[in-house]
């Protein structure tokens, strides 16, 4: 497959001791090269060296989670990087003594070290769930021409194990240096992006590397905090005129004409900003911030993947009444998607915050478990009764309000929609977080589409 003239030109180089013609060739190619060497008596100038190569049979599946091994057989991204030493094992070696002519000296010192096989890393990823995450993420991005991709996470509610984690744009693990995403290729062609930048873009795991303004999906956390603290109850009612003034700032509701008088469940269903500003004010800055901490919003989750991002929040001492108002409906601060889904999980699963993880266990060559994930909750944030109330209200969002597109006959599903406008004009992030069964959540899923065209609501 090499061009003869190119090979001959490279062989004329004199500044290097040898010239590498190809790397990591397949066995059939290596066999052809050996035959060529024998037929042409080229043992003295053309030779092969042994190497190893990682094969990824599922190609693009969970690419940002798994990561890849580079040409030096070192893990470069994802689990490959984090567990590189465990996976790699150790090479064997033989140390012997030779005389000046290169002949071994049998009676001299010799040492033998056996090779050690690498460990097996078992993940929490469910291949079927992962394939659905990737399939529908790709369809959503295509349908709404999302300019900055998106991501999906599916979580086991009772352990924090990640069942699926998809991020777009994606790549083929077997050919990690090739750009395959159409939008990235277009940007490269139009000189809007370098190929190097495109590679980093597709290698990134947006679900944990990037931060974003969560918008109304965060209202579920505010709801749980207020109910747990007792500053708001299911019997309360809220009036919405279409906007509310906080200090000198008018803050509008998505319904410019207002929702009028509404119950708490209706306010959540309408995703009413003025109502949630009132809920936040009743909770107060000190208590509100303490629940940010309790739900894990102020610190990284510690997920077992490299490169986790960090939320960007106000300093606790400078968290004032205006900050409280915007935070109450999920704006003007940023979180990572894995932070938000972990917090929402604590809202609906009985009140328990889990550390999300993608590795369930590590096993050596003899089948002995050397590591097992801790699936005990980090802490209980809210009571089981408060959690059950939140789940019931959020089920109503799907059956009767902004989340109706997630309704499926025969299933009890709860959820919350979200729409947040970025600091870039006319650029939105739309999202949905859903869970099922609503009365005893087992699976929680989150979908986010970045900068879609022609649609600006998470409910869509």
Image (cartoon, helix red, strand yellow):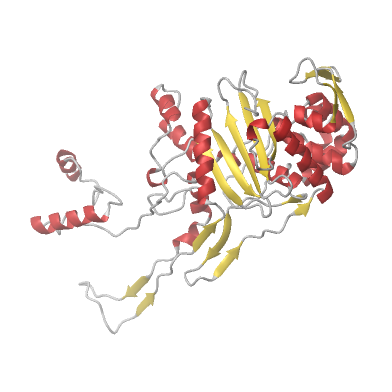
State the image coordinates of residue 16 (x, y, percent, origin top left).
Answer: 25, 48
Residue toward you, 241 or 95 = 241
State the image coordinates of residue 188 (x, y, percent, origin top left).
Answer: 41, 26
Residue at 17% across, 58% down: 34
Q: Which of the 4 quarters of the picture holds residue 210?
A: top right
The answer to whether residue 233 is seen in the rendering is yes
Residue at 15% across, 41% down: 4
Residue toward you, 415 or 297 = 415
Given the current orientation, which residue lies at the most extreme left position?
40
Would residue 98 be found to the left or right of residue 160 on screen? left
Q: Which of the 4 quarters of the picture holds residue 316?
A: top right
Given the current orientation, which residue lies at the most extreme top position?
257
Quadrant containing the C terminus in the rendered view: top right
Callout count = 0
State the image coordinates of residue 165 (x, y, percent, origin top left).
Answer: 56, 44
Residue at 54% across, 63% down: 362
The answer to whether residue 383 is seen in the rendering is no
Against 321, residue 103 (above or below) is below
Quadrant containing the N terminus in the rendered view: top left
Q: Which of the 4 quarters of the picture holds residue 393?
A: top right
Would residue 19 be found to the left or right of residue 189 on screen? left
Against 69, residue 341 (above or below) is above
State the image coordinates of residue 411 (x, y, percent, origin top left).
Answer: 66, 43
Residue at 73% across, 38% down: 395
Against 155, residue 119 (above or below) is below
Residue toward you, 60 or 233 = 233
Residue toward you, 168 or 90 = 168
Against 169, residue 56 (above or below) is below
């Amino acid at each position: 497959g090499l061009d003869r003239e190119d090979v001959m030109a490279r062989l004329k180089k004199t500044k290097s001791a040898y010239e590498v013609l190809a790397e990591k060739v397949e066995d059939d190619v290596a066999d052809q090269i050996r035959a060529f060497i024998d037929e042409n008596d080229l043992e003295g100038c053309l030779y092969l060296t042994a190497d190893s190569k990682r094969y990824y049979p599922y190609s693009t599946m969970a690419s940002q989670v798994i990561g890849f091994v580079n040409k030096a057989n070192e893990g470069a991204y994802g689990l490959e990087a984090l567990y590189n030493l465990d996976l790699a094992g150790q090479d064997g070696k033989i140390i012997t003594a030779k005389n000046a002519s290169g002949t071994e000296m049998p009676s001299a010192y010799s040492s033998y070290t056996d090779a050690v096989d690498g460990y097996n890393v078992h993940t929490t990823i469910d291949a079927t769930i992962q394939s659905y995450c990737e399939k529908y993420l790709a369809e959503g991005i295509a349908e709404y021409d999302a300019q900055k991709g998106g991501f999906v996470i599916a979580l086991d509610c009772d352990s924090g194990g990640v069942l699926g984690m998809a991020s777009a744009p994606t790549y083929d693990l077997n050919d990690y240096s090739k750009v395959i995403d159409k939008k990235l290729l277009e940007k490269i062609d139009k000189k809007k992006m370098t190929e190097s930048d495109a590679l980093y873009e597709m290698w990134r795991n947006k679900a944990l590397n990037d931060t974003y303004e969560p918008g109304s999906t965060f209202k579920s956390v505010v709801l749980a905090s207020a109910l747990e603290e007792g500053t708001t109850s299911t019997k309360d009612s809220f009036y919405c005129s279409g906007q509310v003034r906080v200090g000198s700032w008018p803050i509008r509701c998505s319904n410019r004409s207002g929702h009028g008088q509404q119950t708490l469940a209706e306010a959540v269903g309408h995703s009413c900003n003025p109502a949630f500003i009132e809920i936040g004010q009743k909770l107060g800055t000190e208590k509100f911030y303490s629940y940010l901490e309790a739900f894990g919003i102020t610190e990284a989750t510690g997920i077992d993947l490299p490169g986790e991002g960090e939320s960007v929040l106000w300093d606790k001492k400078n968290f004032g009444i205006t900050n409280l108002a915007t935070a109450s409906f999920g704006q003007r601060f940023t979180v990572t998607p894995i932070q938000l889904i972990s917090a929402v999980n604590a809202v609906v699963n009985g009140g328990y915050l889990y550390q999300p993880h993608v590795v369930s266990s590590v096993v050596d060559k003899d089948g002995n478990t050397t590591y097992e994930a801790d699936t005990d909750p980090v802490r209980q944030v809210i009571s089981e009764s408060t959690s059950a109330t939140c789940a019931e209200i959020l089920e109503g969002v799907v059956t009767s309000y902004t989340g109706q597109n997630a309704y499926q006959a025969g299933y009890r599903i709860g959820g919350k929609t979200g729409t947040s406008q970025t600091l870039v004009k006319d650029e939105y992030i739309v999202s949905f977080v859903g869970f099922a069964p609503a009365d005893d959540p087992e699976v929680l899923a989150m979908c986010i589409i970045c900068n879609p065209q022609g649609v600006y609501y998470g409910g869509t």
